[in-house]
Amino acid sequence: MVTPASAAATPASDERAAHGSALIPAAAERLGDDPIFALNAEASARARAGESIVNATLGALLEDDGALAVLPSVLEAIGRVPAKQASAYAPILGDPGFLRAVASDLLGRGPLAGQAVVAATPGGTGAIHHAVQNFLEPGEALLTTDRHWAPYRTIAEHAGRKVETFGMFDATGRFDVPAFGSALLELAARQRRLLVLLNFPCHNPTGYSLDDSEWRAIGDALAAAAERVPVSILIDHAYAKFGEEGGRGFATHAARWADRALVLVAWTASKSFAQYGARVGALVAIARDDRERASIQGALGFSCRGTWSNCNHLGQLAITSLLEEGELRERAEGERATLIRLLAERVAAFNREAARAKLLYPRYEGGFFVSVFAPDGERAAAAMREHGVYVVPMRGAVRVALCSTPARDVPRLVEALAEGVRR
Ligand code: PLP
């Protein structure tokens, strides 16, 4: 039980206070909660009190009635895992069947899959953690887009690394390849290695997906930087199954890059199997050289042991069946296709209404979120809350979670956005 501090004060705790906090200074001012969860809690409380609320804050796909969307095949696969197998520790690097299944889900059964080292991680978050720990020295910075998922910085700083960014969009609203290229070279002049972190397709928070020419241009920029220092490129594939070709197009780019750079992918079942709670993910590293591959495998195993030891065995076994067993796999794909259609309806409704309202936002073809540009994100989000519409404020924009907004609420959402961004 947690007792209020004042009631719990004792001579011993007074004495501790006099000597200062037991926390190290770097940890003393940290906030453990995500501001998005606080906004969600406020929206839910108002809804419970009887107000009509549109809550476009949370990053989970909800049905139109507000229930969490799940895949019945996933729940069935979890139920089918033999209890004794699920109860046993998984191998430190992950269940071998799971590691193979992830490699072939991402890379098919071609030669690239044979060059992959895979480690199980708790979601994509764990994969990003392992990449930061192993492909940057303490004090070095990863490079990512100026608009990015906020935990990138938490993960990096927690590991004693930093984050540097480049402007993501050019004046025409496309991925700013020259800005990316110069940021790479500039950082390469200051660091002995580079770790680039890009979240495509369906970037969180902007919704942007790269087209083929942008992927190619990124590859060229990576190759130029790789002439100066070793380069790792980490693709955060969290929303891949909601993008074009279910994210499979990425393997073509990875094959092109793998000669010049180390290609890493943060793979996760959280969104693709609507299974956020089981914490099933993996870090995949594609390395051409046998010795490098063996070293990476050792390093990732060491990191697993030194953090979570091993991951959820039940989740790995269930996801393996869903990836590998014909009938179960087909059902999961069919159920996922239904969710993709549900989201696509919302995206279409948003694009229609937002164009009419002349909102400014990046190309948005699918995915959980879109960002709408606003002179002052905080002010826009506060104005929207007055109308019972919740979005997440960011610098110069607000993030809108279409994943949690039914298509019928999109006109109201866009109306509130149009008013909010003018404030
Ligand atoms: N990357 C991005 C961009 C995300 O939005 C999320 C989750 O919201 C993740 C990674 C990690 O999710 P998980 O750790 O559940 O796989």
Image (spheres, helix red, strand yellow):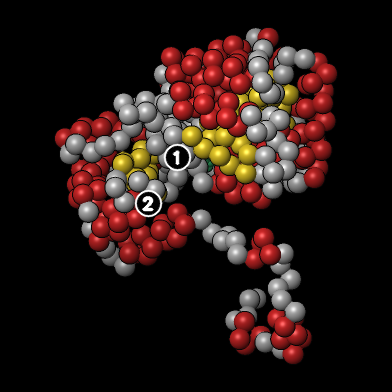
Residue 6 figure quarter: bottom right
**Residue pictured at 21% horizontal, 49% vertical:** 422
Residue 271, image x and y in percent? Answer: 51, 36
**Residue pictured at 31% horizontal, 41% vertical:** 372
Residue 37, image x and y in percent? Answer: 47, 56
Secondary structure beneath dot 2 equals strand
Q: Is residue 348 above or below residue 306?
A: above
For the residue pair 342 and 288, the one nearer the viewer reads as: 288
Residue 11 visible to an observer of this rendering? yes
Q: Which mark is residue 347?
A: none
Most extreme residue toward the bottom, as rendered?
A: 11
Q: Is residue 228 above or below residue 388?
A: above
Per the image, the residue denoted by label 1 is 147
Per the image, the residue denoted by label 2 is 393
For the residue pair 170 and 9, the one nearer the viewer reads as: 170
> Horizontal placement of 422 versus 99: left or right?
left
**Residue pictured at 25% horizontal, 61% vertical:** 386
Residue 89 visible to an observer of this rendering? no
Secondary structure beneath dot 1 equals loop
* In this view, the mark in front (1 or 2): 1
**Residue pictured at 45% horizontal, 39% vertical:** 147
Residue 219 figure quarter: top right
Q: Is residue 373 above or below residue 53?
A: above
Residue 231, image x and y in percent? Answer: 66, 24
Report the image quarter containing ligand 1: top right
- Which amino acid does the dot numbered 2 rest on? Pro
